[in-house]
Amino acid sequence: MFPITTNSLRPILIAALCAAVAAAVAFPSVARAEIKIDGSVTVVEGAQMSGPVERATKDLLSDLDEVFGTTPRVVTRLAEAGPVSIVIGQGPELPFGLKCSMATDTEAFAFSIVNVPGKGKRQAVCLTGADMRGTIFAIYEFSQAYLGIDPMYLWTDKEPEKRESIALPVDFARVYPKPVFRYRGFFPNDEDLLTGWVPAEKGEQTGISPKTWDKVYETILRLKGNMVVPGTWIFPDDAQVHLATERGLIVNQHHAIPLGVNVARWPKDFPYNYSTHPEILERAWTNAVAAYKPDEDILWSVGLRGLSDSSYATLDPSVRDNDPLLGERVSAAIVDQMKIVRAKYPKAQFVTDLWQEGAQLMDKGYLKIPPEVTLVWADTGYGDMQDGGTVAAGQGAYFHVAMMNGEANQLSEMVPVVRIQSELGRYIKAGATSYLLVNTSDIRPVAMTTRALMEVAWGGVPAGGDADFYKRWATEEFGGKSADVLTALYREYFAASALRPNRNSVGVTPTQIEVTREYGDQHYHSEIRRIILDTLSEHQVAAMPSQSPKWTPPRVIPAADAEMRKAVLDWDIQECEAAQPRWDAVWEHAVAAEGVVDPTRRDYYQAGVLTMITINRESNRALMLVAKAVADVDAGRTEQARSDAADALRALDALQGSMAKAEYGQWKNWYRGDWLTGVYRTRELVQNYADHLQDPMAKLPAPMLWAGWEAYFHIMEYEGDRTVDVK
């Protein structure tokens, strides 16, 4: 497990605080001797337990059953407890008059062991929280640190060790301080795999099964997060929103749907223009606020963007190419939105995300953000924060460990842990710890980096850096013998990728192309499909809208000139050729490392390591071969082109075979929802191209890029024809 200890929590100030507080807490009735718990332990709930704490307590009972093979008895009176009990107390009052240790800071919690007054020798293991979420975190930290429950067990398949009893150490008692970041949580964004894996049933009014949403929320809480953005294009009254509240989470909205207005369902006959029709947008904002339930804890996102996560300037000609006026419109919209929310919720809290053009407007001084709004800087999608070194105390971060943009990662890890720790460490140093939202997409493919980020969110950057994290992760997930080998393997994996070109700088020769971050798994497939469709259609490709309202027409992709097309093709060949030996070496080392992996963890090693590497290795190979095939045709080497296309098909078959191996047990149909990266779509188009090379009269695919459309059709299908209420 990753218990919160002074070794893993550093920096030094936090560790010193923990030690000082723990040393100061001493009560006459505190039990000092070692205590054992087993299947006979009684769980005692305080009378004032909230619903979310009761849910966490049920998870604790399940955890105890997993370890001991027996579900403990639950009582609400201390007199009914057995010789050893686990007492759960939600502050600020001590449970049952016991002299348990108590935390006082927001979301902090404490552990202690006390003697229970009365007849006979009875002892209580106290798990107490300063508030509702602190109590929840106490429960889950106990499960993680002492029962051996992996907080991401759903995604890693990790089962705890079966034991007859567990001895709690003499130094069990301590007070855990408040978290480093105030708001911390997930954004399951572009959730295609989750939707395809366990879709909601008819009438459940969620794209993903409510049971799966509940597991997502449980994961957030086990990682000591307190916030969620529950899906991409949702309405405020969708079922998963209130399910988050029932779990004790704060509900937030992402940057594209301020106040919860689902702009991907904007009605066709109503202008989306704050300059000419502000009253329409104001009604939409007002109606969205009214749709939330009164008992929901909302952190309100404010701002102004266009439809389907585009800049507002795409909808309002008056601000196009006029950044000062665009900044003025966004600033005014934020003030209006705050007034609307405060009319119903006077104590509302607000954040605004500086995504894409927001960061540029802020840098130029065109945005005027009210001081009570938390300013949140976004990264590039690759872990590079866009504040330009200007981040300040009280601000926050929106960070991606996965991102759907046609270039980054949806099926595999891409952002190295050292980048996470470096960038967030910089924010911690600046005091910019008010907010941290992590874009997790479908969670399972990025379980490791999600865990790394949430560890920093709660306790700061560990002293051992990325090596410390990789060793602990490998030890927990694959056994202690694998720690050193897999630490080296992960570092090698993150260094293997080719570097993609900045499209804005492509135009002359590869040596003049500005490079950006890694080829993500999406880049390989987007690029293969673009190359093939562009070639077969003679540069007449259109794009089917994906996240846009239904009435948005397809758009024609501007054809690049011949010189630019050749430069990009040459770049893909050059970069992928250079990267292929690196990927081959990573693969060889991963196969060799399987020998030191705990045999009971081989399935997850397949899914979390071997399949992840294969996705990148074979995608890199396929792109290299397709690019070479096109270049071969241009050079008159038709036979070589046919051979390259055939080899590309074999690479994609190997990739799909590895994905199938990762669909064991509960993961059956996991890749059914691969509509955004679209490996199967890539395979179809490479086959089309191979057929064309054999027979120029073979049937051609439609010159249409549409993988994203397919994904959002499924993700949003449950919404039917519902549109935003603007009346």
Image: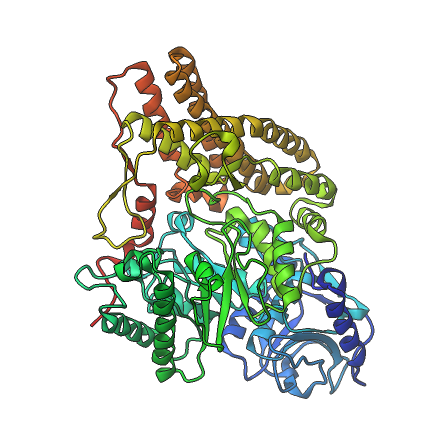
Q: Residue furthest left?
A: 269
Screen quadrant of the N terminus: bottom right
The answer to which of 596 and 122 lies nearer the viewer is 596
Compared across the picture, whether 118 is left or right of 325 comes to: right
The answer to which of 313 and 1 lies nearer the viewer is 313
| Residue 111, picture quadrant | bottom right
Q: How is the image coloured?
A: rainbow
| Residue 557, picture quadrant | top left
Q: Position of residue 296 (x, y in %)?
A: 42, 75
| Residue 531, picture quadrant | top left
Q: Position of residue 530 (x, y in %)?
A: 36, 33
Is 465 located above or below residue 299 in the figure? above
The answer to which of 362 and 344 lies nearer the viewer is 362
Is 246 located above or below residue 665 in the figure? below
Q: Residue furthest right?
A: 33
Identify the residue shown where x is 31% and y is 48%: 546
Identify the residue shown where x is 72% and y is 51%: 468
* Count of number-bearing discs: 0
Screen quadrant of the C terminus: bottom left
Compared across the picture, whether 348 is left or right of 268 comes to: right
Q: Position of residue 134 (x, y in %)?
A: 60, 74
Residue 273 visible in the current orientation: yes
Identify the residue shown where x is 71% and y is 41%: 482
Compared across the picture, whether 184 is left or right of 24 comes to: left
Residue 455 visible in the current orientation: no
Is 712 located above or below residue 504 in the figure? below
Q: Position of residue 269 (x, y in %)?
A: 16, 61
